Image (spheres, rainbow, N blue to C red):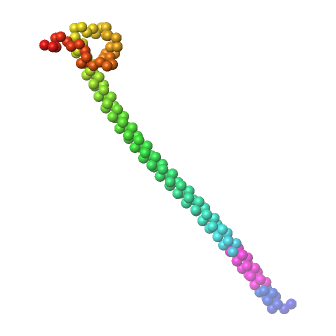
Amino acid sequence: MDPIIWVVVAVVAIAVIVLIALMARKARDTRRHAEAERLRAEVGQKTQHVEKREAAAAEVEARARAAQAEAEAKAAEAARLQDTAQTHRQAVDSSREELDAQRERADALDPKSSTADPAPGQGDGLPPHGTSTSQRTPDPQQRS
């Protein structure tokens, strides 16, 4: 065989190999492009889902902040009410001490008063319900 024929056969074989390689590369690129498009579509769908979840999370966070603010307001109100109650309790204790002191002075002035044997209903040192200190019998020494 003539060497030119071998050269032509070799060139044709190389051309066929290059053509097959180019076609395989194009087919691979087409498959990769299709896969990339499918992945982009999937990312788009998942992005919408993630955005919905993000909106839901933001809403829950807003509700949590509102609940926290409400709880802090209620705690502040509770503290204020406790302070008010303590102020009232201190005023009551002070008034009760004044009344006890006044009762002791009245008992000390009254010769008929017996501190060792309190009258029924008087065991706690308080006047019976429905009576006040003005309803007690006046001291004859104080009239003058």
Query: Taking the image as drawn, is residue 99 in sight?
Result: yes
Which residue sits at x=41%, y=41%? Answer: 74
Depth check: give the residue in front, 114 or 15.
Answer: 114
* Image side of residue 130 versus residue 33, left or right: left
Q: Which quadrant holds the C terminus?
A: top left
Which residue sits at x=36%, y=34%? Answer: 82
User: Does 84 sit above or below residue 47?
Assistant: above
Q: Quadrant of residue 110?
A: top left
Which residue sits at x=68%, y=74%? Answer: 29
Q: Which quadrant holds the N terminus?
A: bottom right
Query: Taking the image as drawn, is residue 126 in sight?
Result: no
Q: Quadrant of residue 105?
A: top left
User: Does 114 sit above or below residue 54?
Assistant: above
Depth check: give the residue in front, 57 or 37.
Answer: 57
Which region shows up in magenta?
Answer: 13-29
Depth check: give the residue in front, 138 or 92.
Answer: 138
Image x and y of residue 115, in percent: 28, 10
Depth check: give the residue in front, 134 or 125.
Answer: 134
> For residue 94: magenta?
no
Which residue sits at x=32%, y=14%? Answer: 122
Q: Quadrant of residue 45?
A: bottom right
* Image side of residue 77 versus residue 6, left or right: left
> For residue 19: magenta?
yes
